Image (spheres, rainbow, N blue to C red):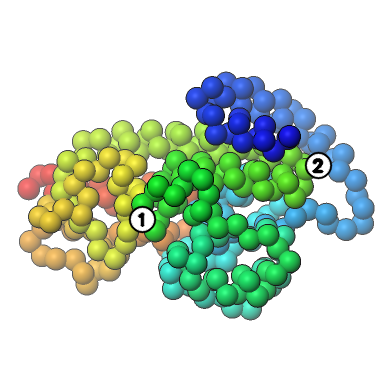
């Protein structure tokens, strides 16, 4: 019954934002008490959660708060399609109770090792979560709406493993909701003047981002600007800009996704601004 209530509150957002704000205030005032009431049994009874990519790790870290420090398999700058695990990641998987990843279609190098080293953990393919199947492209984490859906799933999964701290996790989903909503509105405002500008991206799939923010000129056959993940691919004669779709140089943290999306938006606007002036 508890977890069915979670679903109805999280996903029926139109009628629940006011309630979430009220509940979040209440939870914050009681959070220290809730954590201190967990008995010290002489061992760590908190579930260990591991996320595959930095964006999923970022929203998971916000939800888990001070209770659990989630593990990360793929570092910023690494391609999920090409990433393979090593001894460090094997240890994370062996210790895990819950593994959050994007499935073999997005992260083929992780598939065998998750099954082998995380044999006692619950594995959840976040790309197969209801509400995400209609989102196109292989960079789901560039869509704030997709991230909110993932956040709701994370709350449900972690609360099932650790019901004593359910209120903490549920309270923290309000932070995820608020941050992602503000971020989405801000990016929409920034991109609004550039939506019709035809442009092309080389070396990355920004379908989810382009659809969410209404970039009508994405992957145009006659682009005014070209973004590429590699400088060698940039063509002469049109406006160009480098694109970082993997968050190179950013630290894994609760702030990762906001920094990453703002950086990508800045790179796209740089290119589209030059293209609009041609």
The secondary element bearing badge 1 is classed as loop
The secondary element bearing badge 2 is classed as helix
Q: Residues within 10 Å of mark 2 (few under 14, many from 20)?
A: some
Furthest toward the bottom, the residue is: 87
Left or right position of 239 against 140: left
Left or right position of 139 against 2: left
Q: Position of residue 96 (x, y in %)?
A: 70, 63
Which residue corresponds to the image point at 46% horizontal and 47% vertical from the top-left?
Answer: 132
Q: Nearer the viewer, residue 235 or 114?
A: 114
Can residue 174 be seen? no
Q: Residues within 10 Å of mark 1 (few under 14, many from 20)?
A: some
The quadrant in which residue 99 appears is bottom right
For disc 1, the marked residue is: 137
- The image shows residue 225, relative to residue 83, as above or below, that is above
The image's mark for residue 173 is none
Left or right position of 257 against 95: left
Q: Position of residue 135 (x, y in %)?
A: 39, 48
Can residue 237 be seen? yes
Q: CA distance from mark 1 to mark 2?
A: 37 Å
The quadrant in which residue 17 appears is top right
Mark 1–mark 2 CB contact (< 8 Å): no
Q: Quadrant of the N terminus?
A: top right
Which residue corresponds to the image point at 43% horizontal and 38% vertical from the top-left?
Answer: 183
Q: Nearer the viewer, mark 1 or mark 2?
A: 1
Q: Earlier in the sequence, mark 1 or mark 2?
A: 1
Q: Position of residue 43 (x, y in %)?
A: 88, 58
Q: Position of residue 4 (x, y in %)?
A: 67, 35
The image's mark for residue 164 is 2
């Amino acid at each position: 019954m508890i977890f069915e209530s979670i679903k109805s509150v999280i996903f029926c957002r139109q009628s629940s934002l006011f309630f979430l704000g009220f509940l979040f205030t209440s939870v914050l005032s009681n959070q220290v008490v809730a954590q201190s009431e967990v008995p010290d049994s002489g061992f760590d009874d908190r579930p260990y959660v591991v996320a595959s990519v930095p964006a999923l790790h970022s929203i998971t870290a916000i939800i888990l708060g001070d209770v659990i420090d989630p593990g990360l398999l793929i570092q910023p700058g690494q391609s999920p399609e090409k990433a393979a695990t090593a001894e460090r990641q094997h240890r994370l998987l062996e210790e895990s109770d819950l593994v959050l990843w994007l499935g073999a279609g997005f992260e083929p190098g992780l598939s065998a090792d998750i099954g082998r080293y995380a044999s006692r953990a619950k594995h959840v393919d976040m790309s197969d979560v209801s509400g995400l199947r209609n989102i196109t492209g292989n960079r789901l984490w560039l869509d704030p709406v997709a991230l909110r859906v993932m956040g709701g799933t994370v709350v449900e999964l972690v609360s099932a493993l650790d019901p004593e701290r359910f209120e903490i996790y549920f309270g923290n989903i309000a932070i995820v909701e608020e941050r992602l909503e503000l971020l989405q509105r801000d990016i929409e405002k920034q991109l609004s003047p550039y939506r019709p500008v035809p442009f092309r991206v080389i070396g990355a799939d920004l379908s989810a981002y382009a659809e969410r923010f209404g970039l009508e000129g994405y992957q145009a056959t006659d682009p005014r600007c070209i973004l590429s993940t590699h400088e060698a691919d940039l063509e002469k004669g049109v406006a160009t800009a480098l694109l970082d779709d993997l968050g190179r140089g950013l630290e894994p943290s609760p702030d990762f996704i906001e920094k990453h999306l703002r950086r990508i938006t800045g790179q796209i606007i740089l290119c589209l601004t030059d293209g609009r002036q041609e």
